Amino acid sequence: MTGPQTTRRKRANGVESRQRILDATVEIAGERGYDGTSIAAVSAKCGLPPSSIYWHFKDKDDLIAAVIERSFETWLTTVDLPGDEAGTPLERVTLMAANVARSLVAAPDFLRLGLMLALERRPTEPRGRAVFLQVRDISHRRIAEIIATLFPALAEDAVETLTTYAVAGADGLFVHREVKGDSVDLVSLFELHARLIHDAAARMAGPPIRTN
Amino acid sequence: MTGPQTTRRKRANGVESRQRILDATVEIAGERGYDGTSIAAVSAKCGLPPSSIYWHFKDKDDLIAAVIERSFETWLTTVDLPGDEAGTPLERVTLMAANVARSLVAAPDFLRLGLMLALERRPTEPRGRAVFLQVRDISHRRIAEIIATLFPALAEDAVETLTTYAVAGADGLFVHREVKGDSVDLVSLFELHARLIHDAAARMAGPPIRTN
DNA sequence: TCCTAATTGGAGCGACCCCTACAACAGGAG
DNA sequence: CTCCTGTTGTAGGGGTCGCTCCAATTAGGA
């Protein structure tokens, strides 16, 4: 513990190799999914032999899980959720939606691979799927907090429902863009999404007059 | 053509075998995706040898495409889109959404497998993916027609945007239920979805007073 | 300079993959 | 009965899979 740990780490190019492996894997796995990702293909794409991959990662499952983790982190940095700037709730919700839309366009690998893993239901769940669902829950809670802050009058289950709806809409719109190609204007679709969520929140939080 | 076709079809149990193969395939492919579906596994599940599978289907790609086609048809029969019954637009949109939600709960294999195929981006596209996107476009047009009928004042691109949003929301909510399990009340989430779409359509179609 | 640990190179193992070849069997037609 | 056609059964070929083993190479610490 306290002994001979001078400055010896990062001796060779191990760290860079790890990044090269992850770069190659995220590209292949984002295109072909779990089973479609072969170690041989990753090896060919990153130029390192399979033994190097298995030196850096325990097995294929570990590699995919690491890819999910790193993709989520890089995606988080591009989201850059706004803190507590001024503006009406509608303006702030719209700004957030635009940010998320742009980040999904810029770094789509995370959500594409994650959704593929999430839809699978194999007997022994891959660790990457669990990791994705976990970070997804974190995002869910963050959004729920923001909604609760913007609309303090909302009941707790209303916040939960709106958050679920917000995330689901984002997923669906993302899928639409993945299917239809780059011509889809994700930002404007997210703008509509934000507006509808805002109106729903305002209605749910507003005074209960005019129920029908 | 007009000759010796008495009543000879279905001599052995060929038709039933085809169904057994499709039943086994939709189960496995709905769980594991394209690459995760092996002919050996299908053979084991349906009890027929691989040669029978390859007698009924040209290759694995053909099998998956056939599964998509049949799943879509069985899903269509459970949707049972309402014709032209009476009611306000909101009532009719809500009814449609509830129907779709119930059908997705009853027959989720079609959309689960379809979304998995749609998210993949391999160099040579599987035929099943093309089939899914095709029937998806058919659904899209049907929904667009209904929206245009319910809200005649809507501009054409507004109908298109709303249809895209409706389909995307349905996809996302479906994914949410697939991830979170049977405890998710898909019908009530679709009810909210229908209401938001209706409000958006009414606002877009209505007089442009009170823009802010 | 030698020792040691981190990393790479490459061969290869057993299992599984998709798919095929071909014999065996069933039942209607003659 | 014999044929003929649709369907099943068995065996396996050629290839890829995830993964392992181990020698070779590199660079820091002594």
Image (tube, coloured by chain):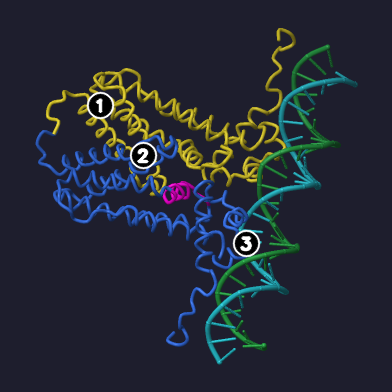
Chain colours: A yellow, B blue, C cyan, D green
**Chain that bears disc 3:** B
Residue named by callout 3: B50
* Residue for point 71% across, 26% down: A12
In the rendered image, the residue lying farthest to the top is: A2
Picture layout, residue B83 above or below residue B169: below
- Taking the magenta stretch, the answer to whether it contains residue B48 is no
* Majority secondary structure of magenta residues: helix
The picture quadrant where one finds residue C17 is bottom right
Between tags 3 and 2, which lies in front? 3
**Secondary element at tag 3:** helix
The range drawn in magenta is B109-122
Tell me which label, 3 or 2, sits earlier in the chain.
3
- State the residue position of label 1: A91
> Few, some or many C-alpha atoms within 10 Å of disc 1 (few <14, some 14-19, many ≥20)?
some
Q: Nearer the viewer, residue B188 or A48?
A: B188
| Neighbourhood count class around disc 3 (C-alpha, 10 Å): few under 14, some 14–19, many 20 upward | some
Residue marked by disc 2: B173
Residue at 42% in and 86% down: B2
Identify which residue is drawn at 20% across, 47% down. Answer: B92
**How far separated are the C-alphas under marks 1 and 2?**
25 Å
